[in-house]
Image (cartoon, helix red, strand yellow):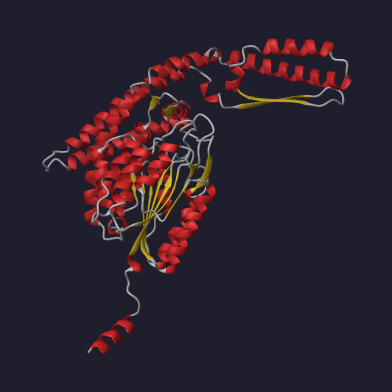
C-alpha cells in the first residue's frame, strides 16, 4: 500500500504549491524633489506594506531613490521582499524582465503590479509616462519635466504574456492621468486607475485604497469601496465591463466639472486655466454647451427612472445641481476671459530673421505671450545699437546689425498685436486677478465628485447585473 501511494505521488508530478505563488511588483516614488527626507508617497507605501508583509505574497520593490526616510520605510514595510531597489529606468526594465521570467517559469499564478509615482498626461503610445528617480527642480504636476520618465506602454508585453500563459494579472496605476493605462486591459488583465486620463490623482486616495486591501477580497470590491468612501475630483477607473461602459458614456461629459485650480506651496494644481482658454474659442464653446445639454438630459432620464425606488432619484438631482452650480461659476470666468479679446492667440509663435551682408543671421522666435511680456524691447534695441557703434570687427558688427533688425521686427509685431487687440495690454495682470477668483473651484469640483460617486455606484450595480462578460478584476482575489 505504501508503494501504491508513492507511485501516485510520482505520477502526479511535483507539488503545485510553487505554481500557486502570488507576486507583487511595487513601483514608483519618482519625481519628488531632492532635499527632503520623505516623499508624498510614503503613507500609501506604508499602508501597502502593512497588508503584504502579513501575507504569503512574494514582493519585489523598486521605489524612490534619494530620500532617506522613504528608503528606510521601504525596508521596514517590506522586510521579506525578494529585492528592493531605487526606481530608475534600468530597475523598471529589470523588474519587468524578472516578472516575465516568473510567468514563463510557471512559478506564479497571480501577478500584481502597483505603480505610485508622479504621472504625465498621455502624449503618444497606448498609455502615459511616469516619473522615475528624483526631480532635479521644482515639480510641475502637469508635466514632471524635471525628472526622468518611463512609459507604462512597457507593461503591455507583460499583459499579453500573462494572457497567453493563463496568469492572472492586475495593474494598479495610482499616478496622475492614470486613466490612460486602461488601454492595457484584456480578458485576463485587470487595470485600475487612480484618476481619469485628464485628471490628477490624490495621495490620500491611494492610501485609502491600499488600506482596504484584505485577504479574501477581490480587486473590484476594493475599488468600489474606496471610490465610494473618498470623494476627490479624480474619476478613478476600472477595466471591468461595467467600469468600461460607464467611463465611455460619462467621463468626457463630467470631465470639465472635475477640473479645478488649487494653489500649493511648491506649485499649483491647475487643469482649469487651460480648459477655459481652450473653451474661449467658438467651436470649443459650442461643444461645451452641447455636451452639457446631453449630460442634463441623461441625468433627468436617470432621475425619472429612479422615482419608484427609495431614493426617488435624489442622487441624480443632487449631481445635476452641483454641475449647474459649477457651470455657472465657469460661465462667469469665461465671460471675463472673452472680454480679453485675442487671448486665444497667446500660444501663436512668431519668427524674426535678419541678415546683414554676408554676416551671421540673427534669429528670434517668441509666442505672443512672450512678446506681450517684453516691455523693454526698446531698451534691448538701444543696447544693441550702441554695441554696433563700438564694434571694430566687420563680421561681428554685421551680426549685431542683424540682431538689431530682428529685434526691430519683434517690436513692430508687438505693436501690431496691441493695435489689433488692445485688451491684451497688461493681460497677465488681468489673468492674475481672474485666477484669484478661481480659488473656490476645488470645493465646487469636490461637490460634483461627491455626487458623481453616487451616480457611479448606481450605474455600476445595474450594469453588473446585465452583463456576463469576463471580469478579471472580480476574479483577482487577494
Horizontal side, residue 139 vs residue 50: left or right: right
Residue at 33 percent of width and 84 percent of height: 11
Horizontal side, residue 393 vs residue 348: left or right: right
Horizontal side, residue 354 vs residue 51: left or right: right
In this orientation, which residue lies closer to the viewer: 177 or 266?
266
Quadrant in which the N terminus appears: bottom left
Above or below, 74 against 170 in this view is: above
Q: Can residue 190 be seen in the rendering of this structure?
A: yes
In this orientation, which residue lies closer to the viewer: 220 or 331?
220
In this orientation, which residue lies closer to the viewer: 357 or 42?
42
In percent of width and height, residue 133 lies at: 50, 41
In percent of width and height, residue 352 lies at: 71, 24
Tell me which corner region of the image, top left, top right, bottom left or bottom right, holds residue 57: bottom left
In percent of width and height, residue 355 lies at: 81, 24
In this orientation, which residue lies closer to the viewer: 434 or 76?
76
Residue at 38 percent of width and 67 percent of height: 166
For the image shown, how many numbered marks are present on the structure?
A: 0
Quadrant in which the C terminus appears: bottom left
Q: Can residue 176 be seen in the rendering of this structure?
A: no
Residue at 40 percent of width and 69 percent of height: 106
Above or below, 475 against 314 in this view is: below
Residue at 42 percent of width and 64 percent of height: 103
Tell me which corner region of the image, top left, top right, bottom left or bottom right, holds residue 225: top left
Tell me which corner region of the image, top left, top right, bottom left or bottom right, holds residue 319: top left
Amino acid at each position: 500500500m505504501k508503494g501504491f501511494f508513492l507511485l501516485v505521488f510520482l505520477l502526479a508530478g511535483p507539488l503545485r504549491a510553487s505554481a500557486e505563488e502570488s507576486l507583487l511588483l511595487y513601483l514608483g516614488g519618482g519625481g519628488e524633489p531632492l532635499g527632503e527626507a520623505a516623499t508624498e508617497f510614503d503613507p500609501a507605501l506604508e499602508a501597502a506594506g502593512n497588508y503584504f508583509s502579513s501575507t504569503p505574497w512574494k514582493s519585489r520593490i523598486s521605489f524612490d531613490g534619494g530620500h532617506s526616510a522613504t528608503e528606510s520605510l521601504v525596508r521596514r514595510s517590506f522586510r521579506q521582499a525578494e529585492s528592493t531597489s531605487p526606481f530608475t529606468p534600468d530597475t523598471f526594465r529589470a523588474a519587468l524582465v524578472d516578472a516575465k521570467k516568473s510567468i514563463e517559469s510557471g512559478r506564479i499564478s497571480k501577478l500584481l503590479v502597483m505603480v505610485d509615482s508622479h504621472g504625465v498626461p498621455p502624449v503618444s503610445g497606448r498609455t502615459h509616462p511616469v516619473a522615475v528617480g528624483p526631480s532635479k527642480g521644482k515639480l510641475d504636476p502637469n508635466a514632471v519635466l524635471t525628472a526622468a520618465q518611463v512609459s507604462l506602454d512597457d507593461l503591455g508585453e507583460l499583459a499579453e504574456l500573462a494572457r497567453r500563459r493563463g496568469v492572472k494579472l492586475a495593474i494598479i496605476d495610482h499616478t496622475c492621468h492614470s486613466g490612460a493605462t486602461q488601454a492595457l486591459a484584456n480578458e485576463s488583465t485587470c487595470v485600475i486607475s487612480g484618476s481619469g486620463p485628464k485628471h490628477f490623482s490624490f495621495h490620500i486616495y491611494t492610501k485609502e485604497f491600499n488600506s482596504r486591501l484584505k485577504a479574501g477580497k477581490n480587486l473590484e470590491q476594493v475599488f468600489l469601496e474606496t471610490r465610494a468612501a473618498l470623494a476627490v475630483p479624480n474619476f478613478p477607473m476600472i477595466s471591468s465591463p461595467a467600469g468600461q461602459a460607464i467611463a465611455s458614456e460619462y467621463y468626457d461629459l463630467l470631465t470639465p466639472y472635475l477640473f479645478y485650480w488649487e494653489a500649493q506651496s511648491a506649485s499649483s494644481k491647475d487643469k482649469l486655466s487651460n480648459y477655459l482658454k481652450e473653451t474661449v474659442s467658438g467651436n470649443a464653446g459650442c461643444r461645451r454647451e452641447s455636451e452639457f445639454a446631453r449630460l442634463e438630459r441623461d441625468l433627468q432620464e436617470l432621475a425619472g427612472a429612479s422615482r419608484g425606488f427609495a431614493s426617488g432619484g435624489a442622487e441624480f438631482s443632487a449631481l445635476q445641481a452641483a454641475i449647474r452650480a459649477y457651470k455657472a461659476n465657469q460661465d462667469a470666468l469665461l465671460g471675463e476671459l472673452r472680454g480679453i479679446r485675442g487671448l486665444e492667440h497667446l500660444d501663436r509663435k512668431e519668427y524674426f530673421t535678419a541678415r546683414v551682408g554676408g554676416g551671421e543671421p540673427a534669429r528670434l522666435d517668441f509666442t505672443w505671450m512672450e512678446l506681450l511680456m517684453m516691455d523693454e524691447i526698446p531698451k534691448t534695441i538701444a543696447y544693441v545699437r550702441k554695441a554696433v557703434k563700438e564694434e571694430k570687427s566687420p563680421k561681428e558688427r554685421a551680426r549685431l546689425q542683424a540682431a538689431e533688425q530682428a529685434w526691430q521686427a519683434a517690436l513692430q509685431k508687438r505693436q501690431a498685436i496691441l493695435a489689433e487687440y488692445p485688451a491684451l495690454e497688461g493681460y497677465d495682470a488681468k489673468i492674475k486677478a481672474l485666477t484669484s477668483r478661481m480659488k473656490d473651484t476645488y470645493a465646487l469640483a469636490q461637490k460634483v465628485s461627491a455626487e458623481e460617486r453616487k451616480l457611479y455606484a448606481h450605474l455600476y450595480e445595474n450594469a453588473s447585473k446585465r452583463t456576463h462578460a469576463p471580469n478579471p478584476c472580480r476574479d483577482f482575489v487577494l
